[in-house]
DNA sequence: TGTCCACCGGAACCAAAGGGGT
DNA sequence: ACCCCTTTGGTTCCGGTGGACA
């Protein structure tokens, strides 16, 4: 047994490819953030109010994914905290922590109190949060990342409450840093929330290809052994990510996975084909993961779409729903209403698995036209492997 | 020039699961 | 013991709609 472990262990230790793979992982925050100097400066100059123990303005940060919003924010806050040491901050990702209850629970927990993870009302949690805040007697910065996801699901109520905490708390003060990659998001907000959350605004522009290249180069030196990754490979990864709205995280993922593939193939240099394979593999993993964790009826709807698309090139909501009902019935399962199915189709669209666009066909009504946005093989594989009921159905 | 299709999508509400406080 | 909470994945009801066709 331990031989196997040893073997695996030594293969990591003696990797011909990686010196230290960690530098390419998405949660690694580097010592310096190239090409984000302006943003760091701006953010720091707002937060520096902390020096006098004052509450900095609430800040709203926009920028597309992978433009360094999260990294810059964490970087500035942790550095400031090291130097000032008179405030605290919580970082909450509102896509993972996606209910008002859990946001409050997280804040309370980071402040050092325990709360039950269900059972209480949000009003009660709010009360408790105020209590712990009152006790801490400091300035508190609350970072809400991907705040748009939360508001889409639960409205801006909690934001309103959070922006008003300062009226309820006297010995401490809080500021909110909201981060979003949806630029239009702020328009839909309650005006009161908008004005108080947007006391200061910061926009992160996407990286261009050269900047991405520079970033990749710096990380590659740390992560890879010498000679494993050539300049042209880095250029390639940067170019691919730049096409994809300058997403640095994608660029780094690409480079890392390309390295992993190279290692698996027991080669000692990353080549263009490994980068291409990485691109495909990343997309495939993402799609697989998303599909495998879908609720049952969403999977069924997806299966219906796959089935329908073997006969037609595009499907309407009605056609999908008929198929779905047939499949569900033949499997002896209940089926959801068309209203719900329509929502499921929208959800699949937003996840990028299908592409659904609303069309008006005059006399023939208004509907949605659906086509698959990813390879059907991987969709089917994910469906069949994640639920044995489908396997029975598909083969039988 | 109006009709009318085949849905869209907002709103309110529901029930079971997983839990509280007092 | 009793009545309370949120979340998830729904349901019911319904007004709205762009443009092909008579």
Image (tube, coloured by chain):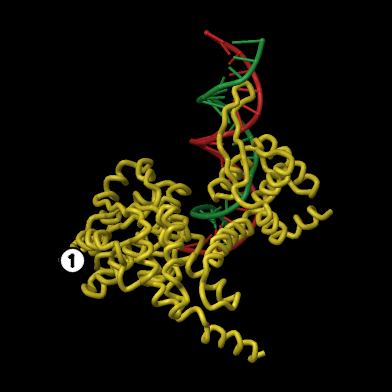
Chain colours: A yellow, B red, C green
Which residue is situated farthest in the right direction here?
A396
Coordinates of residue C9 in the picture (x, y in percent):
62, 50
Query: Closer to the camera, A358 or A11?
Result: A11
Tag count in the figure? 1
Location of residue A384 by image quarter = bottom right
Instruction: Please name whichever residue, A254 or A23, is drawn nearer the observer in this view of the structure.
Output: A254
| Image-based side of A207 in relation to A335, left or right | left
Q: Quadrant of the N terminus of chain A?
A: bottom right
Find residue A345 and report its horizontal and vertical position in percent. Answer: 60, 43
Q: Please give the name of the residue rendered at 52% of the width and 82% of the height, measured from the top-left corner.
A: A16
Residue sitting at x 56%, y 65%: A273
Give the side of residue A217 with respect to residue C15, left or right: left
**Residue A266 screen position, x and y as percent:** 59, 78
Q: Nearer the viewer, residue C17 or A52?
A: C17
**Residue displayed at 71% across by 61% down:** A385
Pick the quarter of the image with the C terminus of chain A: bottom right
Quarter of the image holding residue A185? top left
- Pointer 1 chain: A
Which residue is under mark 1? Answer: A53
Q: Name the quadrant containing residue A187.
A: top left
Secondary structure of the residue carrying tag 1 is: loop
Q: Is residue A124 visible?
A: no
Q: Which residue reaches farthest bottom?
A: A3
Side (left or right) of A53 relative to A122: left
Q: Which residue is located at x 57 percent, y 27 percent?
A: A360
Viewer can see residue A285: yes
């Amino acid at each position: 047994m331990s031989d196997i472990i040893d073997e695996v262990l030594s293969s990591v230790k003696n990797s011909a490819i990686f010196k230290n793979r960690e530098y390419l992982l998405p949660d690694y925050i580097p010592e310096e953030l190239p090409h984000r100097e302006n943003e760091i400066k701006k953010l720091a100059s707002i937060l520096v109010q902390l020096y006098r123990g004052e509450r900095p303005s609430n800040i709203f940060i926009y920028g597309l994914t992978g433009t360094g919003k999260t990294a810059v924010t964490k970087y500035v806050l942790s550095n400031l905290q090291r130097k000032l040491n008179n405030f605290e901050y919580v970082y909450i990702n509102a896509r993972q922590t996606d209910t008002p209850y859990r946001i409050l629970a997280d804040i309370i927990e980071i402040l050092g109190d325990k709360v039950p993870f269900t059972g209480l009302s949000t009003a009660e949690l709010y009360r408790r949060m105020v209590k712990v805040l009152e006790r801490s007697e400091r300035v508190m910065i609350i970072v809400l990342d991907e705040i748009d996801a939360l508001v889409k699901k639960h409205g801006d109520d909690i934001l309103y409450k959070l922006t008003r905490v300062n009226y309820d708390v006297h010995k401490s003060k809080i500021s909110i840093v909201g981060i979003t990659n949806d630029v239009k998001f702020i328009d839909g907000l309650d005006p009161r929330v908008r004005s108080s959350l947007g006391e200061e605004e910061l926009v992160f522009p996407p990286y261009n290809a050269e900047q991405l290249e520079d970033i990749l180069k710096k990380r590659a030196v740390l992560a890879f052994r010498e000679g494993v990754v050539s300049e042209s490979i880095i250029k390639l990864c940067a170019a691919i990510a730049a096409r994809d709205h300058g997403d640095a995280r994608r660029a780094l993922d690409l480079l890392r996975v390309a390295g992993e593939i190279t290692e698996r193939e027991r080669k000692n240099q990353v080549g263009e084909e490994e980068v291409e394979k990485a691109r495909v593999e990343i997309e495939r993993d993402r799609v697989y993961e998303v599909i495998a964790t879908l609720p049952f009826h969403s999977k069924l709807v997806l299966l219906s779409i796959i089935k329908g698309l073997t006969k037609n090139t595009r499907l309407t909501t009605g056609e999908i729903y008929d198929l779905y009902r047939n499949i569900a019935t033949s499997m002896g399962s209940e089926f959801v209403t068309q209203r719900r199915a329509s929502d499921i189709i929208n959800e699949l669209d937003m996840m990028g698995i299908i592409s659904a666009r609303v069309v008006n066909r005059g006399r023939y009504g208004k509907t949605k036209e659906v086509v698959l946005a990813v390879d059907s093989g991987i969709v089917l594989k994910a469906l069949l492997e994640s639920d044995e009921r489908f396997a029975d159905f598909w083969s039988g």
